[in-house]
Image: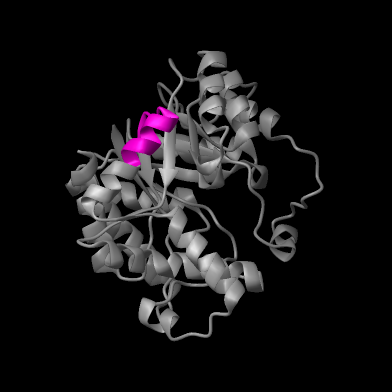
């Protein structure tokens, strides 16, 4: 079971955004030392709680700070970019860090209407994700009408970040799939992934591959682990209330805030969706998830306010899966 990390460069209350990016690079260095398989970063635009809007720049920095761990995106939102430009960026990364670069592709647009307008991408525009993805692959494979530079032998492995529709597309195009979020709790998840494997057309990859992305936090006791999950659950609840996804706050500040019944319910739901607990609890829950999904790899997308606790959780998680 290959274990990876996805870091979204979460900002923290009272700290400058730039510090969040340095924390991401530091976490990647620690992940390599601990033996994680890959380390991915994310793309979000004009979100107060996320400092990373340019995965290629951040991946390049991480690549220079590490030497072995696979690096990449989780993911690049293809509807916001020209396929040729994305291909050029990741071919360049592969040329600079040979054999280490992955390209995770998503289809999400901006978080709010003003952000979508700033990105010149309205939500009612035609869905060209399939065509754009095929065009991108043609550049990466050196089969397009124009040749993306630099030319790199073997191209760049492409993954599809997907829900139901994306899972079907990944199967048709012969690409690995990364699933996470609400789809993991859906009753149809086993059938969806079984159909992906049955209908997989070997092309971009030799075989069907499923990576499950899930929030995981490990601590010495259950109460501490659930408290580590509180800042992310609180931020998500605030985003649903205000329309703005905020920086992480400390559990102490959250616990003294004015919650309200709706916020309390949403926070409890968020903490419940996180696999948080002791090593034994986390192992048991991950084993059930792997059995249900048949996952080939796990990608922990965890975040919390306390960086020392986050690093300790990463180490314990690696021990659990290992």
Q: Is residue 59 found inside the magenta-colored segment of the image?
A: no
The image quarter containing residue 107 is: top right
Q: At x 53% / y 14%, what residue is drawn? A: 198
* 17 is higher (above) or lower (below) than 284: below
Q: At x 80% / y 45%, what residue is drawn? A: 125
299 sits to left or right of 184 = left
Q: At x 19% / y 38%, what residue is drawn? A: 322
In this orientation, which residue lies closer to the viewer: 187 or 23? 187
In this orientation, which residue lies closer to the viewer: 265 or 234? 265
Residue 226, position in %: x, y? Answer: 35, 64
Q: Is residue 288 found inside the magenta-colored segment of the image?
A: yes
Residue 296, position in %: x, y? Answer: 37, 28
Residue 99, position in %: x, y? Answer: 32, 30
Please provide the residue range marked out in magenta. Answer: 286-297
The image quarter containing residue 217 is: bottom left
Secondary structure, magenta segment, majority class? helix
């Amino acid at each position: 079971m290959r274990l990876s990390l996805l870091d979204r460069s979460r900002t923290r209350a009272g700290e400058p955004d730039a510090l969040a990016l340095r924390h991401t690079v530091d976490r990647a260095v620690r992940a390599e030392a601990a033996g994680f398989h890959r380390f991915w970063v994310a793309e979000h635009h004009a979100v107060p709680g996320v400092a990373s809007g340019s995965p290629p720049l951040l991946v390049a920095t991480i690549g220079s700070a590490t030497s072995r761990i696979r690096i990449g995106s989780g993911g690049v939102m293809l509807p916001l970019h020209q396929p040729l430009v994305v291909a050029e960026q990741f071919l360049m990364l592969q040329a600079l860090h040979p054999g280490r670069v992955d390209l995770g592709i998503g289809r999400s647009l901006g978080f709010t209407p003003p952000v979508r307008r700033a990105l010149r991408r309205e939500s009612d525009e035609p869905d060209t994700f399939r065509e754009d993805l095929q065009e991108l692959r043609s550049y990466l494979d050196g089969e397009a009408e124009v040749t993306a530079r630099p030319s790199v032998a073997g191209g760049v492995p492409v993954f599809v970040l997907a829900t139901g529709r994306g899972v079907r597309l990944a199967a048709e195009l012969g690409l690995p799939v990364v699933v996470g979020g609400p789809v993991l709790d859906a009753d149809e998840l086993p059938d969806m992934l079984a159909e992906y494997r049955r209908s997989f057309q070997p092309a971009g990859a030799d075989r069907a591959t499923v990576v499950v992305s899930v929030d995981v936090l490990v601590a010495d006791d259950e109460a501490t682990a659930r408290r580590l999950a509180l800042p992310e659950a609180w931020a998500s609840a605030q985003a649903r209330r205000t329309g703005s996804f905020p920086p992480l706050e400390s559990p102490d500040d959250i616990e003294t805030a004015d919650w309200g019944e709706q916020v309390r319910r949403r926070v409890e739901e968020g903490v419940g969706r996180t696999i948080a607990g002791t090593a034994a609890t986390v192992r048991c829950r991950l084993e059930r998830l792997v059995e249900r999904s048949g996952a080939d790899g796990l990608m922990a997308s965890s975040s919390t306010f306390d960086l020392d606790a986050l690093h300790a959780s990463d180490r314990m998680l690696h021990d659990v899966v290992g």
